Amino acid sequence: MGIGTGIALVVIGAILAFAINVDVPAVDLTMIGYILMAAGAVVFLISLILMLRHRQVSSTTRSAVDPNSGERVTRRSTTDNDGPVL
């Protein structure tokens, strides 16, 4: 389930709550619409929080030969979503 699922649940719930005026015995479509909208909001928020917590780490190692001294130089760097970490 993702952000799209949450939005879809909110839209379907709003349609059931506000746009459909059908009288079905033993079923309250307005209440079902409100429940779907609440569930959609919860799914949307959980998906958003999980997406923001996802961290991607990238490590880079570069080796080169210094033209002046002939020594081998190695540079290592690690980056994540918060910025570079050395």
Image: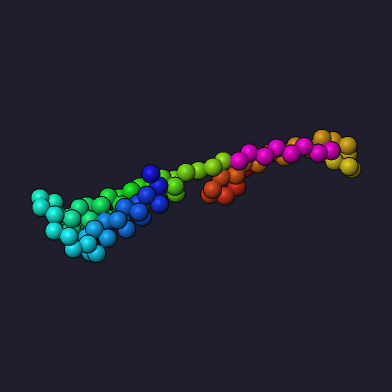
In the image, is residue 60 part of the stretch drawn in magenta? yes
The quadrant of the rendering that contains the C terminus is: top right
Tell me if residue 38 can be seen: no
Q: Which of 40 and 78 lies nearest the eye of the viewer?
A: 40
- Please identify the residue farthest to the top as the structure is shown: 72
Q: Which of 33 and 70 lies nearest the eye of the viewer?
A: 33
Image x and y of residue 46, in percent: 35, 47
Image x and y of residue 35, in percent: 22, 52
- Name above or below for residue 39 compared with residue 15: above
The rendered magenta stretch, by its main secondary structure, is classed as strand
In the image, is residue 38 part of the stretch drawn in magenta? no
Q: Which of 43 and 85 lies nearest the eye of the viewer?
A: 43
- Name above or below for residue 19 compared with residue 83: below
- Name above or below for residue 8 compared with residue 71: below
Q: Which residues are magenta?
A: 58-65
Q: How many marks?
A: 0
Image x and y of residue 68, in percent: 89, 43
- In the displayed structure, does residue 21 sit left or right of residue 46? left
Tell me if residue 24 can be seen: yes
- In the displayed structure, does residue 40 sit left or right of residue 32? right
- Please identify the residue farthest to the left as the structure is shown: 26
Q: Which of 76 and 47 lies nearest the eye of the viewer?
A: 47
The quadrant of the rendering that contains the N terminus is: top left
Image x and y of residue 19, in percent: 24, 64
Which residue is at 36% across, 55% downward? Answer: 7
Which residue is at 17% across, 60% downward? Answer: 22
Snapshot quadrant of residue 66: top right
Q: How is the image coloured?
A: rainbow
Which residue is at 88% across, 37% downward? Answer: 70
Which residue is at 18% across, 63% downward? Answer: 21
- In the displayed structure, does residue 76 sit left or right of residue 20? right
